[in-house]
Amino acid sequence: MQTDFQSIFLNLQTYWAKQGCVILQPYDMEVGAGTFHPATTLRSLGPDFHWKVAYVQPSRRPNDGRYAENPNRLQHYYQFQTIIKPSPENAQDLYLGSLQAIGLDVHKHDIRFVEDDWESPTLGAWGLGWEVWCDGMEVSQFTYFQQVGGIECHPVPLELTYGLERLAMFIQEIETVYDLDWDGVPTHRGGKKYGDIFKLAEKEFSTWNFELADTSILFSHFNDAETECAHLLSVEPALPLPAYDQCMKASHLFNLLDARGVLSVTERQNYIGRVRQLSKGCCEAWVAKTRESNSE
Amino acid sequence: MSELFVEFICEEIPARMQKNAINHMAKFLTSSLIEAGLLDVAFVNDTKSAIGPRHMAVGLSSLRKKQSDRVIEKRGPKIDASQQAIEGFCKSNGISPTHLVRKNTSKGVFYFAELKEKGKTIKTFIPEIIYKLVSEFPWPKSQRWGTSRVSWVRPLHYINVVLDSEVLPGSVDLGGDMSINFNNVGYGHSFHHKDGFKIFGFDSYISKMRDLDVLVDVQERRSKILKNATNIAEQKGLELVGDDSLLEEVCGLVEYPNVLCGEIDSKFMCLPDEVLVTSMRVHQKYFALKNKDGKIEPYFLVVANRKPNKKIDSIIVKGNERVLRARLSDALFFWESDQVKSLKAHREKLGSIMFYAGLGQVSDKVDRMEELAASIAKFIPGCSQFDASQAASLSKSDLVTGMVGEFPELQGIMGGYYASAQSIVESQTLAIRDHYLPKGGEDRLPETAEGIVVSMADKIDTLVGFFAVNVRPTGSKDPFALRRAALGILRMIEERAIQIPLDQIFEKAADLYGFKKVDDELATFITERLKVRLKDNGISYDVVSAAIIDADIQNIYNQIEKVKALEEMLKKPSGVKLLESWRRAANMLVAETKKFKTEVNSFYSSLQFADEIAIDESLFKFPAEMKLFKIVATLPNEVGETQKQICQTIQQYSSLYEPITEFFETVIVNDNDKKIRNNRLNLLKIVCGKINLIADFDKIER
C-alpha cells in the first residue's frame, strides 16, 4: 500500500466516501481547525437529521510556528475531518477501518482510547471522547459533540480529526515532518518532500506571525469583522452563512494577535468572549433559519 | 435462592472514573435488592464486582425469588366525614365499607383501609432497578450519543442480565427511539476475538473473559503489571520507580496488560531525572527504571493492551521509542535553550505574568519576597539572610522557561537545576528548588534554613495578598490553595521549632504590597488552621480550644508546645490535680460573682488583672489561707517556651491541689465581714489568674 502523504489523504477520502460521506474540499478561509468549517459547526446543529461529510482542512495556528526549526511543530498543517450524524453504533469499528485503509494495521499495533474531553471556548462547543493512541503516538481525536454555539446537538454528531502530518510521520517511520515523502516519487525524478513545499512558508509566516504583523491593522480588522458579523445577523432575514465567515475571520485575527503577544491575560479572555458571542449568534441564527425553511 | 449477573459493555471508560463507577454499581444493586426485601443484609459482602475499560460487571447471590406480600394501611376520611367521602374512598381503593377499620390518631379517629400488596417477583423488579441505575448513574461527566436522550459516560452498547444462568427479558429505553435489550452474550478482547459467548454467572464469566484475553478484575491487572514490570527491572539489575497513581491509571487503560521495555536514546540521558520521569509519565504513561543509587537508567516500560507476540511487541516498542524520542527532543531543546539566559535574565520576563488582579505581576511578587525573606531570615537560626534573599529573588525565574511551560509540575525543581548549572551557591540553589514545599500534610519540608525562609516568604506573601483583595477559602472552594499555604507555614514552624512573630511578618508583607494593614481575618484563619491541624493529629478538641488563643499569632510555636504539654499532662495525676484545683476555685468565684454582681467585677475580665490584685494578709483567719497565698506566690509567672518546660510548669502548678483542698475544707469564703470575704475571693482570683496563664481551663471537658 502506498504511504506517501498524498496517498494517505486520498485513501482516507476514498474510505469515507465508501461509507457514504459527502466529500467536500477545504473551506477557503484561514481557520484554526477543521471544526471551524461550516460543514462541521453549523451542520452539527441542523437542518439535516443525517449529515455525513469528510474533508481535508488546512489549519493555521500562528502560535505553533517554529521558523521551520522544530521537527514536529507547524503554524500551518493539515487536518482530515469526518463528521457523522447521528453518531453510528459501530463508530469505533468504522474509525479503526479507516486506519486499516491507510496502511495502519490495527492488529499489529497497540491502539488505545485515552480520555480527552474536547472544548472550544471560541465556538462555545464541547464534547466527550478520546485521543486515539497508536503505539504511544496520538493519531486522532475522537469526539461525540454535545453542544455547539451553546446549543445542544441532537442527534449527536461524531467528529473524527486526524492530524495528517503526525499520522504520516508515524506510518512512514520518520522523525522530522520536513522529511515526509509527499508524492511517492523518488527525489531524483522530481519527487517532493514536505519540506520542499512548506519549509520556506513556515519560516516566512513565523516571522510575520511573531514579529511583523501590524497589530493596529489586526485590531481594526478584528473590529471590522465583528461589526460586519453583527450587521449580517441583525438584518431581516438574517444571513448566518456570510455572518459566520466574519466570525471565522475574527477568530483567526484573534489567534494572530495572540501570537504577537499583545494581549494581556484579561484582554485575551475578553477577545475569546467576543468571538464566542459571534459564533453563538451565527449558530442561533442558523438554527432559527433552517428550522423555518424545514417547516415550510 | 437466585443468582444475578449484570454487565454493562460500553466504549472506553476514562481510567480515573472506573473505581467509583463499579463501587456505585455494586452498592446500588445490593442496596436496592435489600430495600426490596429480595436480599438479606447478612449476604451483603457476597456481592462481587469487576471493572475494565469496556466492561463493568456485578454478581449477586442468595436472592429471594419473590417479595413477600405486604399489608399497607391507607388513611381515609375521618369517621364523621360525609357518607359520600367514605364511599368514594372505598371505591378508589376497591374495598367494601365493611372492611374499613377505625383507628385513633393524634389528629382524631379515622377510617383506614388495609390493602394487601402482592409481592413482586425478582423478574419484574430487576428491569426497574436497572433502568434506574442507567438513567441516574452519577458519572462525573456523561454524554448522549446517536439519538439518545439518556446519557452514559461513553456510548453504552450491551446490557447483560443473567438470572440463574438464563437471560432475563427486559430492556432499557434510551429515548430518541433507541433502546438496549437485555442479553447474555459476553465479548472478549475486541482486537483478538469477535464472537460472543454465553454468560452463566459471575465466576464463570470472569474466567471465560480471561480465556478471551480480558482481565476484568482490576486487582488481577494491577498485580500482573507489577509482577511483569518488576521482573523486567530485575533482569536488568534495576528497580522500578514506583508510581501508584500511574499504575492506577494504566490499569484503567488496558484490558490485557503486556509490559514491554524500550530504550531511551543515550543523548537524552543528560536531562535531569525529574524531566525524564515527568516527560515519560505525563505524556506517555511510561514507567521509569532506576539503579541502586536511585539514578534513572535509559529504559522505559510501556504497558500495551494486547496479548504478547514477539513480532508485534517489537513493532510496538519501536513505535513507542520513536514517540519518546520526539518528546525528549522537545525537552532537550528546552533544557538547552533555557540555559542560554541566566535566571536573573529570566526574572526580567516575570513582568509579563500576572500574579493576580490587584496583586501585581509575578515580578512584583518576587521583589516583595526578596525583602520579606530578609525579615523572616532573622528568626531562623543558622540562616544566611543574604542567601535567602538572593534565592527568593530568583525563585520564580523558571516560570518563564520552556521546560516549566511544558511541565508546570517541575516548577522550582527546574529553577534549582538551572541555578546549579550557572554555579549559584548551593544554599541558594536548594532554596530555589525547595521553596514550593511542603505541598501538603505528608510532603517533605525544604531541606535548608534558606529553603524554609523562601517557602515562608512565598506563602505569607500569597496569604496576605489574597486576604487583602478579599479572596479567601469558602467551604470546599480554595482555588489558590490558601489552606495548603497556611498548613505549610504551620508545619515548618512546628517541625523546625521556629519562633517567629507572624503578626509582625504579616505587617511587613502588607507594607510591601502598599496595603495599610493586614486583613483582620487572616490571623483568625491561621489559628483556625492550627486548631484543625492539631485535632487532625489526634489532640483532644477541648485541649486545643483551651490552649490556643484565637488570632494570637505572635508565637505559634509556643502555642503548639502548650497544647502538647497540656494534652500530655492531663493524662497524668498532676494535670488532673491542677484541673481539679481550677474547678474548685473557679466554681466558687463564678457563684459568688453572680451573687454580688455589684461588688465583684465580672469573673473573667478580672483574671486579666490578677497580678494587680492586692491581698491583705492581716485579714487571713485560718492557716489554710496563708498557706495557699504563699504557694501561689512561689509559682512562676512565665509558663515556658518548650513542651518540656511547660510540662514542668504544670507539674509545679499542681502543687496548688493540697492547699486548695485544705482551703475549701477549713475556710468559709462567705464571711459576714465584707472585707474578709472579698480578700478571700481575691485570693481565689489570683489562683485562677495564675492557672489561666497556661490555658483556659474552663474549656476543658473531662
Image (cartoon, grey):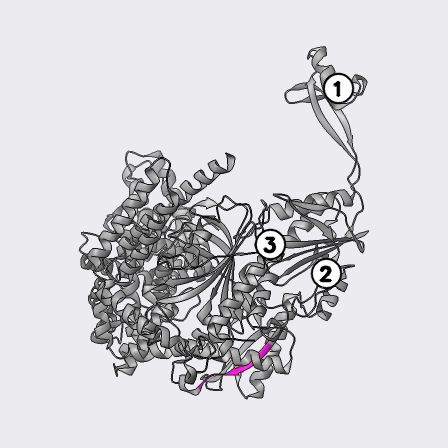
Chain under label 3?
A
Q: Residue at x 72, y 16 (%)?
A: B88
Figure check: B474 above or below B394 = above
Packing grade of label 1 (10 A; few <14, some 14-19, many >=20) is: some
The amino acid type of the residue labelled 1 equals: Cys
Q: Nearer the viewer, residue B195 or A24?
A: A24
Residue B679 located left or right of residue B147 = left
Packing grade of label 2 (10 A; few <14, some 14-19, many >=20) is: many
Q: Same chain for the residues at labels 1 and 3, yes or no?
A: no
Q: From where the camera sits, is residue B484 visible?
A: yes
Residue B576 rendering spot, x and y as whole percentages = 46, 56
Numbered marks: total: 3
Q: Which residue is mark 1?
A: B90
The answer to which quarter of the image holds residue A177 is bottom left
Q: Residue at x 22, y 71 (%)?
A: B389
Q: Nearer the viewer, residue B654 or B702?
A: B702
Q: CA distance from mark 2 to mark 3?
A: 21 Å
Q: Which corner quadrant holds the N terminus of chain A?
A: bottom right
Which of pointers 2 and 3 indicates the residue nearer the eye?
A: 3
Of the image marks 1 and 2, the number of the one nearer the N terminus: 1
Residue B44 located left or right of residue B244 = right
The secondary structure type at the circle numbered 1 is helix
The answer to whether mark 1 and mark 2 are in CB contact below 8 A is no
| Span highlighted in magenta in the image | B259-265
> Residue B262 in magenta?
yes
> Residue B260 in magenta?
yes
Q: Which residue is mark 2?
A: B186
Q: Which residue is mark 3?
A: A88
